[in-house]
Image: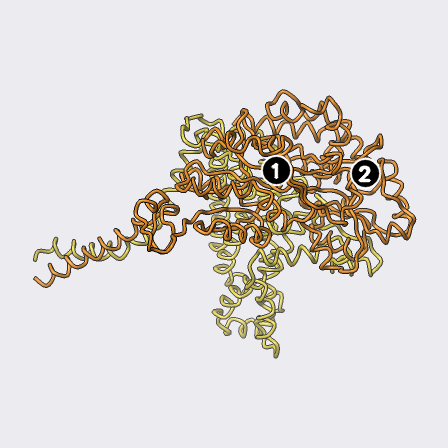
Chain colours: A orange, B yellow
Amino acid sequence: MRKKLALFCSIMALLLVVTACGSGGANSSANSTGSTSPTQAAETEQPSTPAKKTKLTWIYWNNEDTVKAFLDLAKEKLPDIEIEFQYVENKNYDQVVRTKLLAGEGPDLISSLINDNTVKLGYFEDLTEKYGNLYQDAGKKQYTINGKLYGLPQVSFFNGYFYNVEIFEKYNLKVPTTMNEFYEIAETLKKNGVKPLTNGYKNPSQLAQSFISMAITEYYSTPEGKSFDDNFRLGTAKMADALSPSLTQWTEMVKRGIVTMDMLGLEDPQALDEFASGKAAMYKNGPWNLEAIKKKNPNIKLDMFPQPNSAGGVGWLTGGAGFSFGINANSKVKDEAYRVLDLVSTPEGQEALAAGNLGGQSYLNGVVLPVPDDYKSSFEAFKAGHVYFPPASWGSLKDPIFKELGIQLQGLVAGATKPEDVLKNVDNKADELRSK
Amino acid sequence: MNRLAVSFRKEAIYIFFLAPAILLYFTFFILPSLQTFYYSFTNWSDVNPVDVTFVGFKNFAVLLRDEVYLKGITNTFTYAILYMVFVNVCAIPLAVALNQKLVTRSLLRSIFFLPAVFSVLVIGFLWSFLYSTSDFGLINQIVTGLGFEKINFLGNPKIALYAVVFTQVWQFVGYNMVIYLANLQTIPSDYYEAAKMDGATGLQTFRSITLPLLLPAISFCTVMTMINGLKVFDIVFALTGGGPAHATETIISLMITKGINEGFYGQGSAFGIVFMLLVLLLTTVHLRVIKYLENR
């Protein structure tokens, strides 16, 4: 009898545990106070009960500090919504979020990951009708698949040549407007024992960034280059056919000892140290490192100039939308997610998002954000709209092809890959990826 | 109660205690292994995550054609063999030396063992700064201070792999030394006394007594270092990321890049199967050689 009683108690305890476990889901439970979904909450809410918060998740690859201003604004403007911010490191971001989406879960707000495949798999809400007219085409392009907008482009990033103003003044150097002037500057610096350029080319993406900057000024900015990215994504255009002259121009930097094999052994923080300490005069990077440079050397006077064009004129910065806001099609709190996107799409929302990335520009129509003096020499490029990031239009090829381009360029710098094979190998990789 | 019932009850108790371990083993090893085998013959990818179809040996054929995969296999074998040889060749004399009656014996043992305590990733980031070609790289500061040219340890594709091997030999010599020390302490001192009375030199004693009696530790350490060498990933990830220009790519780093990051799940699975077979083959040969030496 005692055994039977014990067995009965055990089964009841087990049932209680199982029932408790099954009552909550990632998105279904609003918070610890127990509300479930906005609809249910609206049905059951009594006037006298305190306002219940609906929780929605947002996964992003920059740390919470960079979006703190926006999270604070959301807390103030949307008091019934609690945004649960989750940080996932950039290099793991796609994999982590893709796995969650594949399992029918994932965050309610997704930054980036919008491409032909993810849209085909139905992971994202179509935002065209509600937000299509609010944002500039330049920003929308990379998040528009088959004519529909799936992500709202946010604060732009850009990449140019940071230079040490004091070193430039010491040797009477002026901001270059052509590649020949750039080479002359490098030569003068080398003669005076100053390393002209430093970069952490151990990371292949940094090397790819350098080449892409050259390709923008030499090819993408020409009428023939306008449609290349779309054709490349579809497989109707080859890099080897279109970008070989740009590669020849870029190889000059290797031949002239500006890009060296030593840089292949450098991490980005090590390159940053070299620049901040005045051992190198130029450092190709973006605003996300400005604070780190100034922290290393608070007295440094720096500025940024865009990639010079071999023919002269206003140069180009490499850049585009820093990230996007998309809504998970499987989200259980879509109404709330739309309300967050409504807030994002206001000038106030844009200013708050830009607070953690000073210098970045807004793609929301009519919103112009201030550019700090640290980018004085790039004002003309900003004004002319000379900010472009070709890989953003490569769809699902973007990350693997950008990395492969960098790997092949590493081979070129190290003398292990022939210049004529660099772009061919990248094309082969793109074919392999398209054939999946 | 008959004997059958007693026997069944006994078995049931064993099964009850073993069940959690078996369940975990089945869930996290057997089942994924079987699934990997199945997926290696399919077109499973990030583009095609649900409706997978059978593609025969296509994924295996790609492995044999792709230069990067072949480079990864070559690098892995080079790494594993160099790592195994150097770790053991350094650990044995070190263990013999620190088995002597030295005043600083305990301190030296701790110092040599210490690097093994740290995570491989920590060691990787540490060496990344030591090897740096910037003016802040300690080793290159010494090298240039002595009047030589800087050595591009991690940026030169011809030497990057060897630079990676060196860090791991440095980190794990002490760990293997401890295993050899444990074995050395089981060798009866009578043998050494007898050898001394017979007038054997130190080298003769080492060759005829120490080395043969160290074979149990040698077989364990060499097999383990070989297997760990074949599985190398974290140090490559921390030091070079597989570069420059695929120069330090290994089987596991490629499995992660191609099989996961690039979404070629089927190819990644096939590479996993090939990797398992290669490890099986190599360790079988290795164990046979050790057994042959032990029998001699």
Task: Report crowding for label 1: few under 14, some 14 to 19, many 20 or more residues within 10 A (C-alpha).
Answer: many
Mark 1 → mark 2, Cα distance in angstroms: 37 Å
Camera-side residue: A229 or B130? Answer: A229
Residue extending furthest toward the front: A47
Relative placement, left or right, of B72 versus A188 is left
The answer to the question of whether label 1 and label 2 lie on touching residues, with beta carbons closer than 8 A, is: no
Residue A429 falls in image quadrant? top right
Same chain shared by disc 1 and disc 2? yes
Relative placement, left or right, of B253 versus A282 is left
Q: Amino acid at mark 1?
A: Leu
B199 to A245, vertically: above or below: below
SS of the residue under disc 1: loop
Res B60 visible: no
Camera-side residue: A195 or A347? Answer: A347
Residue drawn at point x = 30 percent, y = 48 percent = A44
A236 to B35, vertically: above or below: above
Residue placed under numbered mark 2 in the picture = A253
Residue extending furthest toward the bottom: B103
Camera-side residue: A51 or A36? Answer: A51
Residue extending furthest toward the top: A236
Task: Report crowding for label 2: few under 14, some 14 to 19, many 20 or more residues within 10 A (C-alpha).
Answer: some
Relative placement, left or right, of B161 versus B220 is right
Instruction: Tell which tag, 1 or 2, sits nearer the viewer.
Output: 1
Q: Position of residue B208 (x, y in %)?
A: 56, 63
A99 to A78, vertically: above or below: above
Give the mark nearest the N terminus, 1 or 2.
2
Residue A322 falls in image quadrant? top right
Q: Position of residue B183 (x, y in %)?
A: 49, 66
Q: Position of residue A259 (x, y in %)?
A: 78, 42
Camera-side residue: A178 or B1? Answer: A178
Chain letter of the residue carrying label 2: A
Residue placed under numbered mark 1 in the picture = A364
